[in-house]
Amino acid sequence: MRLPGATSLPFNIFTDSVPTNRLPQVNQKKDARLMVRIPCWIFVMMLLASGTSKALVLGQELHPPLPPDHLPPVLDLSHIPLGLSSHRNIPAENPLTAEKVALGRQLFFDPILSANRQVSCASCHLPEFHFSSPNPLAIGIQGQLGKRHAPTLVNRTYGTSFFWDGRAKTLEDQALQPIENSLELGFKVEGVLTRLRQDQQYDRLFQAAFPDGTTRTNLARALASFQRVLLSGDSPVDRFLAGDFKALTDSQRQGMWLFDSRAGCWKCHSGPNFTDERFHNTGISWRKSPPDRGLFNATKQETDQGKFKTPSLRNIAETRPYMHDGSISSLWPVIEFYNQGGIGNPYLDPAIKPLQLTTDEIVHLIEFLKALTSNSDYQAAPGATGAQPRTNP
């Protein structure tokens, strides 16, 4: 809850300012997303206390995924990074175990799940990009382009619905859909199960993880279990909110103030994961004809036309490109898009209005978003030959 008059505090409550002629430098290796919505009075006090194929033709590239041995051999099942909630969405019928995570990890990186044995989950969700993709659109079997950008899988244990259009309600439901999508892995789950049952290594892994062995349900549960341990927190913003007032620069603190006040970013990007887990129409799909209907495709409710899931902002500076269609290549034009009030259409979310931010304020916001980047344990090992993002035209 906001204190009366809280938003009328002077914008320049910080002692130092950043150079106004400097635009933010976009990290050329990646770009990503998350945040904690705190009561405004706590925020103000903290600030004061601180002292301040077809794919190739279109310029996309299928990056070879890192093999699973480039990830840490053991992923902690219980550790919760600073800034994240201890309450994770783990269904009672699929409790986390080391055996399930190990199996899910092996499956995630294995092209055995695709019809031609050449594409894996990691082909689109690369660990060196926080399990997202540097390509605007997902690239699937035989170089086919998907219809949407591959979002990060990090912190999806906190999710309440999945895919940009929310058509899956659990990670288990989400896990199998790419296998049978003709533009992604292009196979049938039954075909995958046949392969896995014929593989002695997988037979042992399934038997160790599940009493009933290799089944459709267990395949989904293993993949979901691996995704649930992909956590990212302990960013400079998290450390600042925990009391380390030197964790943020003056510019980042000004950006945080804007985020939580006049810019109104918090209205959708709230909570520990910097997403309300809801769906909004910003008008982005109205740039194409016909527009992508988003949530409407799943609900058939007229009011859901053009709505897409609010993405997390954690690691946002390292998970570009942005939007559901990967159509914006860097953070500056993203903020400009919202600064102009999105794109008008009959279903535009009423919260999307022109912000009238100055150039300096956009700089501060971008600096704040960069401070949501974490040094995560799941990153590629030093020296690994990971993918490098392409420069978007």
Image: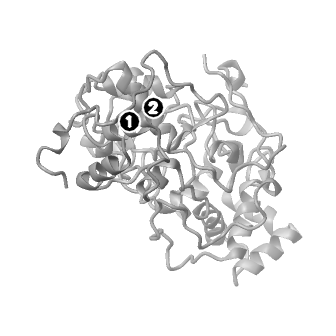
3D distance between C-alphas at marks 2 and 1: 7 Å
Up-down relation of residue 125 to residue 145 (above or below): below
In the displayed orientation, state which residue is furthest to the right. 200
Q: Three-letter amino acid code at disc 1?
A: Gly
Residue 286 visible, this angle: no
Under circle 1, the secondary element is helix
Residue at mark 1: 255
**Left or right of residue 75: residue 244:** left
Q: How far across and how far down the image is residue 329, in percent?
A: 54, 25
Determine which of the numbered discs, if any, sits on residue 280 in the image: none
Q: Which residue is mark 2?
A: 366
Q: Is residue 382 visible?
A: yes
Q: Nearer the viewer, residue 237 or 27?
A: 237
Amino acid type at mark 2: Ile
Residue at 62 percent of width and 36 percent of height? 138
Q: Is residue 25 left or right of residue 50?
A: right
**Residue drawn 65% across and 72% down?**
218
In which quadrant will I find the C terminus?
Answer: top right
Could you tell me if the residues under marks 2 and 1 are in contact, i.e. CB atoms within 8 Å? yes
